[in-house]
Image (cartoon, rainbow, N blue to C red):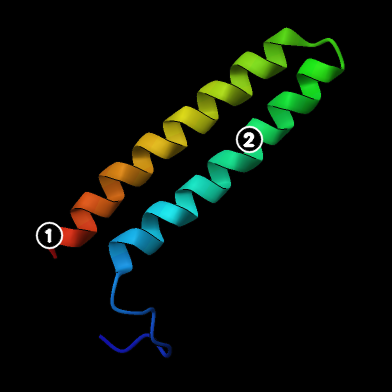
Amino acid sequence: MEIGFDVGANIPSGVFVTHLLAAGFFFYVGGLNAAAGEPLGLVLNGVIGILLALVGVAAARITARR
């Protein structure tokens, strides 16, 4: 299927890195929450970041099989 642009030869790595970038954003926001004295924000954003990283691993493995 033509999607209009070339995403490169190593698509699974790109999928994983994209998920890690999104997870990094949530870790950053969690750090800001911790600096503001809100530990619940740190925990929730940390959990979201970890889950995004795990989904990135799963999505990269699925993409590698196709």
Amino acid type of the residue that numbered disc 1 sits on in the rendered structure: Arg
Which residue in the rendered view is the most extreme toward the right? 36
Image side of residue 2 versus residue 42, left or right? left
Residue 14 position, x and y percent, is 39, 63
Image side of residue 30 versus residue 47, left or right? right
Image side of residue 39 versus residue 37, left or right? left
Image mark for residue 26: 2
**Residue at the (52%, 22%) spot, across then down:** 47
Residue 50 position, x and y percent, is 46, 29
Give the position of the N terminus as an image quadrant.
Answer: bottom left
Q: Secondary structure at mark 2?
A: helix
Which of marks 1 and 2 precedes in the sequence? 2
Residue 29 position, x and y percent, is 73, 32
Amino acid type of the residue that numbered disc 2 sits on in the rendered structure: Phe
Disc 2, disc 1: CB below 8 Å?
Answer: no
**Residue at the (12%, 60%) spot, across then down:** 65
Residue 58 position, x and y percent, is 26, 43
Q: Which residue is mark 1?
A: 65
**Residue at the (73%, 25%) spot, across then down:** 31
